[in-house]
Structures are given as structure tokens and as C-alpha cells.
Image: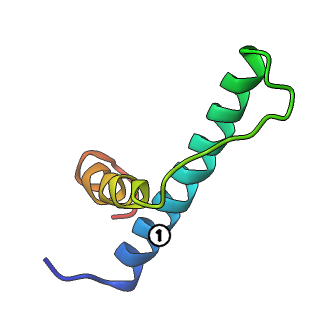
């Protein structure tokens, strides 16, 4: 598989967006449990999962042809 600029950008965007969403939802979950500081958390290792998701979603999507 050839890694192009478009694929690398997709992996990076999915990874960063995934981390952002995870921090957001853990903060909201903390708020619902009574933590008014709204501290969200994630792990940098999750960038691998979200980045791979960016590659795996491409064949089933109809966009960027």
C-alpha cells in the first residue's frame, strides 16, 4: 500500500479528531457524575486506533475518489 499525502493527512485528521472527541466525551461524562471541573482524558496511544480507522473507513466510503 502506497502512503500518499492525502492518506497521511486523513490518518492525522482522524487521529486528532478522535482524541478531541474522547477528551470531550470523558469531560461530559465526568460532569454527569458530578465533577464540575470537566477534566477530560485520553491516551496518546489512541491516535493509532483512530488513525487506522481513517484508513479502514476509506474503502467503504463513497467520497474522495
Q: Is residue 36 left or right of residue 17?
A: right
Q: Is residue 7 left or right of residue 20?
A: left
SS for callout 1: helix
Q: Is residue 41 left or right of residue 64?
A: right
Q: Quadrant of the C terminus?
A: bottom left
Circle 1 packing at 10 Å, graded few (<14), some (14-19), many (20+), is some
Q: Position of residue 16 (x, y in %)?
A: 55, 61
Q: Is residue 28 above or below residue 41?
A: above
Q: Quadrant of the N terminus?
A: bottom left
Q: Position of residue 35 (x, y in %)?
A: 79, 24
Q: Report the front residue among 20 and 34.
A: 34
**Residue furthest to the top:** 33
> Dot 1 corresponds to which residue?
12
Q: Is residue 1 left or right of residue 7?
A: left
Q: Position of residue 34 (x, y in %)?
A: 79, 16
Number of numbered labels in the structure image: 1
Q: Report the front residue among 17 and 23.
A: 23
* Residue drawn 33% across the image and 47% down it: 61
Amino acid at each position: 500500500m502506497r502512503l500518499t499525502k492525502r492518506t497521511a493527512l486523513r490518518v492525522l485528521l482522524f487521529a486528532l479528531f478522535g482524541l478531541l472527541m474522547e477528551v470531550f466525551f470523558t469531560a461530559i461524562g465526568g460532569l454527569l457524575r458530578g465533577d464540575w471541573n470537566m477534566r477530560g482524558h485520553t491516551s496518546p496511544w489512541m491516535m493509532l486506533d483512530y488513525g487506522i480507522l481513517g484508513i479502514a473507513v476509506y474503502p467503504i466510503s463513497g467520497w474522495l475518489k
